[in-house]
Image (spheres, helix red, strand yellow):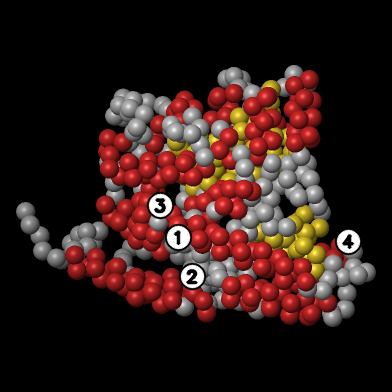
Amino acid sequence: MTRGPDTSFPLEPDAQAFRALVEGALERLVPFLTSLPEQNATSTDDGVALARSLVESAPEEGAAFDELLDLVFERAVPNSFNTASPGYLAFIPGGGLPHTAVANLIADITNRYVTVFSAAPGMVQLETNVVRWFCELAGLPPGSGGTLTTGGSMANWIALVTARRERLPENFLAGTLYTSDQVHHSVTKAAVLAGFPESAVRVVPTDDGYRMRVDALEAAIAEDRAAGLTPFLVVGSVGTTNCGAIDPLDELADVAEREGLWLHLDGAYGGFFCLTERGRAAMSGLGRADSITLDPHKSLFLPYGYGSLIVRDPGALRRANSVTSDYMPAYQEDPDFVDFCAISPELSRSNRGLGLWLPLKLCGVRAFREALDEKLDLARHATEVLRAMPDVRIVAEPALTVVAFRLEPEGVEGEALDVLNRAWIEAVNRRQRVMLTGTVLRGRFALRICVLSFRTHAERIDCALEDLAAAAAEVLVQPR
C-alpha cells in the first residue's frame, strides 16, 4: 500500500517536511554562530524565574516549528553560560565544533547500532580508527585500545572498575587507591560508585607547583601495606581543573611499576596537548600508563558528550565488562575488530565515532595541533601581563593553558583577601565580554583563566586583561 504526503503519520516527515525542519534550524543556527563574538559571555539573570515559566505538561497536540524555535533561541539558549563564546574562559571550556554537529545529524538519521561489530562493521571501524589514533598520540604501544564515553567522569569510573578487577580479589574492600589533593572529584566519585568506602581513597599532598609529592605517595603506600591493606591504583593528573598542574608522570610510573599498582592518568583536560611539542615535554611518561582518560570535548574542542578511555591492554577492559546473553550475537575474536559493548558498560549508545572521525578527517590533526599551540601562547601572554599588574600575584603558573592568580594588596589578608578577590571576579564578569571562574588553593580564593575554546584568540584575551585591570582599579578603591 502506498500513501501520499499527508499528515496521517506525523512521525514520518516526507522529504519536503524534513528539509523544512533542517532549513528552519539552520536559519537560527547560522546567525547564532556568526554573532558569537558579539554575544555576552554569560547571562543567567532571573534564571530561576525563566525555568519556572517553562514548566509544562506533556502536549497532546503538536505545535508550530517556528514557535518552538522562538522559545529555544529567544528564551532558553540566551539565559546561560555562553560556553560557545570566545570569551568563555571559565571552568574547562568545551568548544562545540560545528563539524561534529553535522556528523551527529548524519549519525542520528542513519541510526546505526555501533556497540556490536556485526551490526555496523564500517561504522564501528571508523570509531575503532579514532580510538587507535588516540592511543598512538598518547604513546601507548601497538595493540592498545579503548572506548569512547560521555566524558571524563565515565572514563575514570570504567578505568577504576577495570583496575579493581585486575588488581584485587573478589572481596576488594581492603584495596586502597592514591590521588593528589588536586585530583578531579570524579575520581573519588568513581571509587564510591565502584563499591569502595570514601576512606579507601588516599589523598596525597602536593608540592609548591600543585603536583603530587612522590615521597608522600611512597610513604602512604608503605603505611597501608604495613596495616595489612592492599594498594592497587595510583591516579595521576595530566592538567588539573584547579590550576592545570601536571603530576610527575614518569616518577608515578616508576612507583606503580615497582609496587605492582595500576597507573591511571586523568588527562581529561590536558591529555590532547600531547599533540604539541611543549605538551609532550610537559607530560613525559604519559605512554607508560595502564589507562588514560582523554576528553575530546575539552582539548579537541568538540561539543559536550565526547570523552574517551584508552588502555594498554584492551583485554583488561573485556575481562571487566564482557557479559553475554542468548539473544546477543557472538563477540569478535579477531583482535583487529571490536565489540564496544564487550569493553564498556554501555550496550545502547549513540554513534560517537562519527563525531570525532569527521572533523579529524576534514581538518587534519595539524589544525588541532596549531590551535592548541595558539592556546598555550595565549595563556603565557595572559600570565605575563597579569604578572606586571600592580598587586597581582600568580598563584599557579600555567603548565598548559590554566593560570591562577589573585589580588594581594598590602595590608589585606585572610578572609578579607577572599572577599576582595570574589568582588574582583564579579566586577569582571559583569562586563560580560568574558566569563571567569575561581577556585580555592591552599585555603584561599583565586581567579582562573582557562584558554581552551577554538574561537578564543588574542583579541579576546586582551579584552579579558583590560577588564581585569579596570575591575581591579574599581574594587581596590572601594572601602573594605
Nearer the observer: mark 4 or 2; the answer is 4
Mark with earlier residue (1, 4): 1
Q: Residue furthest right?
A: 411
Residue drawn 58% across and 35% down?
289
Q: Which mark is residue 77?
A: 2
Nearer the observer: mark 1 or 4; the answer is 1
Cα distance, mark 1 to mark 2?
A: 29 Å
The amino acid pointed to by label 1 is: Ala
Cα distance, mark 4 to mark 3?
A: 47 Å
Nearer the observer: mark 1 or 2; the answer is 1
Disc 3: CA contacts within 10 A as few (<14), some (14-19) or many (>=20) = many
Nearer the observer: mark 3 or 1; the answer is 1
Asked if labels 1 and 3 touch by Cβ distance under 8 angstroms, the answer is no
Residue bearing the label numbered 4: 414
The amino acid pointed to by label 3 is: Leu
| Quarter of the view holding residue 366 | bottom left
Q: Nearer the viewer, residue 225 or 175?
A: 225
Mark with earlier residue (3, 1): 3
Mark with earlier residue (4, 3): 3
Asked if labels 2 and 4 touch by Cβ distance under 8 angstroms, the answer is no
Q: Nearer the viewer, residue 46 or 156?
A: 156
Disc 4: CA contacts within 10 A as few (<14), some (14-19) or many (>=20) = few
Mark 1 secondary-structure assignment:
helix
Q: How many dots with numbers?
A: 4
Mark 2 secondary-structure assignment:
loop
Mark with earlier residue (1, 2): 2
Asked if labels 2 and 1 touch by Cβ distance under 8 angstroms, the answer is no
Q: Indicate the position of residue 436 as horizontal and vertical percent values.
A: 66, 67
Residue bearing the label numbered 3: 356
Residue bearing the label numbered 1: 367
Left or right, 358 with reference to 456: left
The amino acid pointed to by label 2 is: Val
